[in-house]
Amino acid sequence: MPQRRVLCLDIGSGTQDVLYHFPDLEPENCPKFVLPAPARQVGARLAALTAAGRAVYLCGTNMGGGFFKAYRAHLKAGLPLAAHPDAVWALTDDPQRLALTTPVVITRDFRMRAFLEDCANLLPGIVGSYKTLSADKDLMLVGGSGSFLYSGKYCGVDGVSVSQALGAKVILVDRYLQEYNYDYLAAAKEALGDDLVGVILNDVPEHFREEAETLITPFLKRRGVDVLGIVPHDPIMFAIRASDLAVGLGGRLVTGAPKTDRLVVNFLIGTMQIENFVTFFKRQKDVAILCGGDRSDLQLVALEGNCSALILTGNLYPNDMILAKAEDKGVPVIVVRDDTFSVAKKMELMLTREKLRDRSRIEHGTKIVQQAVNMTLLKKNLGL
C-alpha cells in the first residue's frame, strides 16, 4: 500500500505552522511555512472595528483563543459585542453561564424577525436565568441600558415589563443631558408605583444644581418620587488611560514611559500657530495633544507643559529630541496612521463611551457617590 502524503497543521494563538509531508522526502525538505493564526487575524480585525466605533458580532466556528485582549479593549471602549454559540467558545470555557447572563441577544436577524412577525414571549427565559443566578444570593443587581420605559418595547422586554416579571425594585439613574427628564420620571412612577425606590440625578453640571435642588426635587417629591441623590458632573469620570487610548486608536506607544496609566480627560488639536496654541493649552488640564508628527514645535511645548499624552498622526515618528524629552517627563507618545481629523473623531467617541473599569476612576466614583447619594434613605426604601 503506497504511503500517503500528510498535511500537518499546528494552530496556536499567534501563528499556524504548516508542514506538507512527502513520505519520500526528508522532513527538512518538505514544504513548510508559517501564517498568522486565525485568532490573530480576528484580533486585528476587532481592533480596527474598535477604532472605528463599530459594534461586533462573532460568528463561525471556534478558532481558539488569542484575541482576548482585543475583545476586552472593545468592551472597555463601551462598544457592543455579541457572539454566536459556536464562536463563543473562543471567549469562555463556560458558555452556559454566559448565556444565563445574556438570555436575550439582540442581533440584526432577531430584529428582522421581531418586525416581521410577533415575538415569542421572552420573559420566562429572563426570569429563569435570574432565578438560577440569584440562588443563594443576598442581593441581585440587574443593570439596564437605553430608555427604561421604551427600549425593548418592540419585543416585550422593556424595563417596566422585565422589572415586574422579576418582582424587582427599581432605582432610576437619570443622566442630565441639556435638560432634566422630569416628565419621564413622573411617567415611570405611574408605571411602577411603589416598586420605584427613587431616582438619582446624575452628571449634573454645577450651574444647574440649584435648579435640581429647588425645583426638580420638590416637584418629584409631590408625585411620590424620592430623589436619592444629585451626582455632580466630574470630568475624571469620563477620562481614559493613555494605554487604552493607544489600543482604541490602533496606535503604537513609542516611549517606554512608566506613566501610560495617566488619565486623559480631554484633547486639544494642535493645528494652529504656536502662540495661539500656548494660549489654549494653558487653560487645559489632563489633556492629550493631538498633532501631526512633523509639528515638533507644538510637541515640545506640549511636553514642557506636562500634557497627559502626545498623539502624533500620519504615521510620522518624532525626532530624537522629542523622544528624549518625553521619556524624561514620563509622557506617553502614541503614533497613529490616520489623519488628524479622523483620529479626533475616534477620540471624541472613545471619551464619551469609555466604561468605568479603571481602578482609579472606580475609587474616585465611589467617593462621589458616597458623598452625593443618601444611602440611609436608599436602604430604607429598599427595606434593607
Image (cartoon, rainbow, N blue to C red):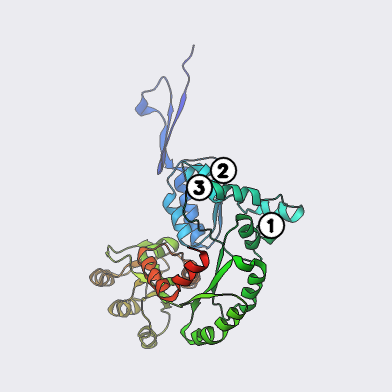
Q: Which residue is mark 2?
A: 85
Residue 212 placement (x, y as % from top left): 53, 83
12 left or right, relative to 182: left
Q: Tell whether label 2 touches label 3 (CB within 8 Å).
A: no
The three-letter amino acid code for the residue at tag 2 is Pro
Q: Furthest residue to the right?
A: 117
**Cα distance between the residues tagged 3 and 1:** 25 Å
Residue 191 placement (x, y as % from top left): 67, 67
The three-letter amino acid code for the residue at tag 1 is Gly
Is residue 265 at least partly visible in the picture?
no
The three-letter amino acid code for the residue at tag 3 is Ala
Q: Mark 1 vs mark 2: give the one in front.
A: 1
Q: Furthest residue to the left?
A: 328
- How many numbered markers are drawn? 3
Residue 152 placement (x, y as % from top left): 65, 60
**Cα distance between the residues tagged 3 and 2:** 25 Å
**Cα distance between the residues tagged 1 and 2:** 23 Å
Q: Mark 3 vs mark 2: give the one in front.
A: 3
Q: Residue at x 49, y 49 (%)?
A: 42
Q: Which residue is mark 1?
A: 156
Circle 1 SS class: loop
Q: Pointer 2: residues within 10 angstroms few (<14), some, or many (20+)?
A: some
Is residue 240 at least partly visible in the picture?
yes
341 left or right, relative to 327: right
Query: Which of 12 and 377 lies nearest the eye of the viewer?
Result: 377
Tell which circle, 3 or 2, labels the residue nearer the N-terminal end: 2
- Which mark is on residue 135? 3
